[in-house]
Image (tube, helix red, strand yellow):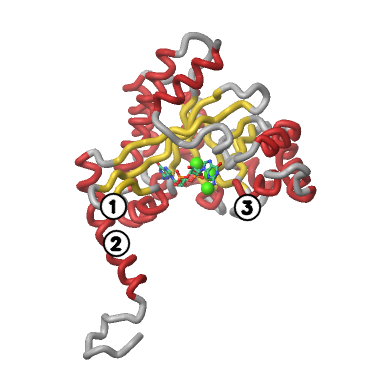
Amino acid sequence: AKAAGGNRFERADPEADARAITRHGLTNALPAALDRGEFFIEYQPLVHLGDGSVHGAEALVRWCHPQHGVLGPDRFIPLAEHTGLIVPLGRWVLQEAVRQARFWSSRHADGGPLRINVNLSPTQLHHPGLVADTVDVLERSGLEPGALCLEVTESALIGADDDLLKPLRQLAEMGVDIALDDFGTGYSNLANLRRLPVSVLKLDRSFTRGMQTEPADPVDLKIVEGIVSLAHSLELAVTVEGVETGAQAEQLRRIGCDTAQGWYYARPGAPDRIHSLALSDAV
Ligand code: C2E
Ligand code: CA
Ligand code: CA
Ligand code: CA
């Protein structure tokens, strides 16, 4: 740091200062933003690799900030986590996404309901109201529990004790699916998977990057093959994230992955599009 006129708060990195000020400002603005309805949700389809039909969608929150424009979750979720605002914000996302899913299924002519995936952050996982809130949201919407999948990151569950797993077990017993998000980034013990009440592995994007080209990276291919066969032997479904090319989709389908998500199919977008995609492949 430069010594400047006795002001010991002055630092040599104005950009870092600006970022810190923005962070501070965003953190302070979060509660009012929730009250004013500045958050909205985009939905990204999850597609069956076998036939390309829509399986459901993941809810991804955004903040339409009056000065900064639309902010992605990476900009504000960590701040909301830090201050605890993630609990009411996460409850809002759950409620909104479940309501949306109920609307889709009520309009979905045949077959099962479209499924809705909602992200849970570690603080929400530790919050004592999680099970009651989820039950409440499901009951008020009329969505069947089996149509909801809660995504928890692998890192949030590493070393998790029974106290932390208990609410997830309760939800799983009700029929809610629990997905292990960003799988493969957290160095968890694979044998540990048996202990967790999860029914879906979401394989992180980093694993599928080597498959964007034909031929695919042979090592990446082997690793994904191994994970898929292990997951299936534990009766877990495998979803792959970040599918950006047809070559990737084809490789992943051949390997036996169940569902996929990525720009190749659709970017996150307005809820209506999920509905029309689902209806169009129902014909
Ligand atoms: P995530 O759960 O791993 O979500 C997937 C992210 O990958 C999303 O970023 C999505 O837009 C992006 N993505 C999807 N397909 C592709 C692709 O083909 N290529 C590439 N490069 N990226 C793709 P997004 O929307 O910015 O969300 C970032 C993270 O923010 C999410 O990662 C999730 O951890 C968190 N998040 C989003 N919504 C919520 C929420 O409601 N609650 C909580 N707690 N976290 C959320
Ligand atoms: Ca996720
Ligand atoms: Ca993920
Ligand atoms: Ca991720």
Query: Considering the numbered disc 3 on the image, is that residue within a helix, a strand or a loop?
Result: loop
- The reply, left or right, for residue 222 in relation to residue 107 is right
Residue 170 seen in the current view? no
Question: Residue 44 location, x and y as percent?
Answer: 48, 33
> Is 265 above or below relative to 186?
above
Q: CA distance from mark 3 to mark 1?
A: 37 Å
Label 2 belongs to which residue?
22
Query: Considering the numbered disc 2 on the image, is that residue within a helix, a strand or a loop?
Result: helix
Q: Of discs 3 and 1, which sits in the foreground? A: 1
Sequence order check, earlier mark of 2 and 3? 2
Label 1 belongs to which residue?
68
Q: Amino acid at mark 2?
A: Thr
> Is 61 above or below relative to 148?
below
Q: Residue at x 40, y 48 (%)?
A: 73
Query: Considering the numbered disc 1 on the image, is that residue within a helix, a strand or a loop?
Result: loop
The quadrant holding residue 100 is top left
Sequence order check, earlier mark of 3 and 1? 1
Q: Residues within 10 Å of mark 2 (few under 14, many from 20)?
A: few
Q: CA distance from mark 2 to mark 1?
A: 10 Å
Label 3 belongs to which residue?
188
- The reply, left or right, for residue 115 in relation to residue 72 is right
State how many labels appear: 3
Q: Residue at x 26, y 50 (%)?
A: 30
Q: CA distance from mark 2 to mark 3?
A: 34 Å
Q: Residue at x 31, y 71 (%)?
A: 17
Q: Amino acid at mark 3?
A: Ser
Q: Are marks 2 and 1 in contact (CB under 8 Å)?
A: yes
Q: Amino acid at mark 1?
A: His
> Is 219 above or below relative to 134?
below
Find residue 272 and name its label.
none
Of 129 and 151, the residue lying toward us = 151
Q: Residues within 10 Å of mark 3 (few under 14, many from 20)?
A: some
